[in-house]
């Protein structure tokens, strides 16, 4: 179903946040990996470890701030673009196509008489 | 889910995520340096095995916490996405979607007349 541009923009922003959240895990993994190597005696990895830790916190901050902004956007849109209540939306309008088809047939066979 | 709930959850998760990695790094040296830790555990009196076991369990707990935290944040983005897609205020349909009920009525009446003959009212 085609979405309005404003919704598309929000969905794209949420996709980017998802990517960043996954990157948080990746940086955590890199940090632990570098730490393990460091413990095995590779002292040269110290700057790399620092970089990974920095990346972890930077990505975490970035993604959570973006997420907070998204929640704000959501809050602002309630009432104007979004319904203030949760409704269990089922497959509304899915039968529209069939209905129009049947009406067209009826028009063809009955309407022309 | 209301937005305040989402914000609270985000705050809590961010806090635990920011501590999880630090805890992991701290725990990585517990088995060999329990003596010079800042005394917040009883490791100095325990055997090295018990300290190491505790350390491993704590590492597991914090790793799980880290992964769970990221999962929770992903759940939040999913909830927001769901609200955007499913919670939109339905627009008035354009002319192409609207059903001409009067025309339907006329067609139906005509069909009935054709099948059963004109009904005298």
Image (cartoon, coloured by chain):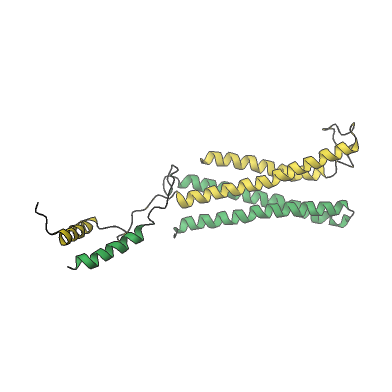
Chain colours: A green, B yellow
Residue A75 is situated, as x and y percent measured from the top left of the image, at 49, 44
> In this orientation, which residue lies closer to the viewer: A61 or B54?
B54
Q: Residue at x 77, y 52 (%)?
A: A31
Hey, which quadrant is residue A86 in on the image? top left
Numbered circles on residues, count? 0
Relative placement, left or right, of B61 versus B52 is left
Residue at x 47%, y 56% (from the top left corner):
A6
Judge left or right: residue A27 versus residue B35.
left
Q: Is residue B96 visible?
A: no
**Residue sitting farthest toward the left:** B120
Residue A42 at x, y percent in the picture: 88, 56
**Between residues B113 and A31, which one lies in front from this camera angle?**
B113
Give the side of residue B114 with respect to residue B25, left or right.
left
Residue A103 appears in view: yes
Q: Is residue A9 above or below residue A109?
A: above
* Position in image of residue A72 (x %, y %): 52, 45
Report which quarter residue A26 is drawn in: bottom right
Give percent across and percent down for residue A73: 51, 48
Measuring 17% from the left and 61% from the top, which residue is drawn there?
A: B115
What residue sits 34% from the left and 61% below the top? A98
Q: Residue furthest front?
A: B116
């Amino acid at each position: 179903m085609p979405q309005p541009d404003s919704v598309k923009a929000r969905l794209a922003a949420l996709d980017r946040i998802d990517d960043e959240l996954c990157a948080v895990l990746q940086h955590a993994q890199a940090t632990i990996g570098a730490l393990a190597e460091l413990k095995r005696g590779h002292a040269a990895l110290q700057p790399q470890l620092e970089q990974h830790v920095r990346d972890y916190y930077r990505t975490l901050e970035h993604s959570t701030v973006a997420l907070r902004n998204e929640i704000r956007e959501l809050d602002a849109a309630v009432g104007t673009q979004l319904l203030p209540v949760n409704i269990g939306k089922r497959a509304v309008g899915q039968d529209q196509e069939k209905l129009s088809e049947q009406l067209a047939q009826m028009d063809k066979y009955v309407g022309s008489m | 889910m209301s937005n305040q709930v989402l914000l609270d959850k985000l705050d809590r998760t961010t806090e635990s995520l920011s501590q999880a990695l630090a805890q992991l790094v701290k725990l990585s040296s517990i088995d060999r340096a329990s003596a010079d830790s800042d005394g917040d555990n009883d490791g100095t009196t325990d055997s090295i095995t018990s300290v190491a076991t505790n350390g491993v369990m704590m590492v597991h707990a914090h790793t799980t916490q880290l992964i769970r935290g990221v999962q929770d944040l992903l759940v939040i983005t999913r909830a927001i996405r769901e609200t955007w897609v499913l919670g939109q205020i339905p627009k008035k349909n354009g002319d192409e979607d609207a059903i001409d009920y009067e025309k339907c009525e006329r067609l139906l009446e005509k069909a009935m007349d054709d099948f059963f003959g004109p009904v005298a009212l």
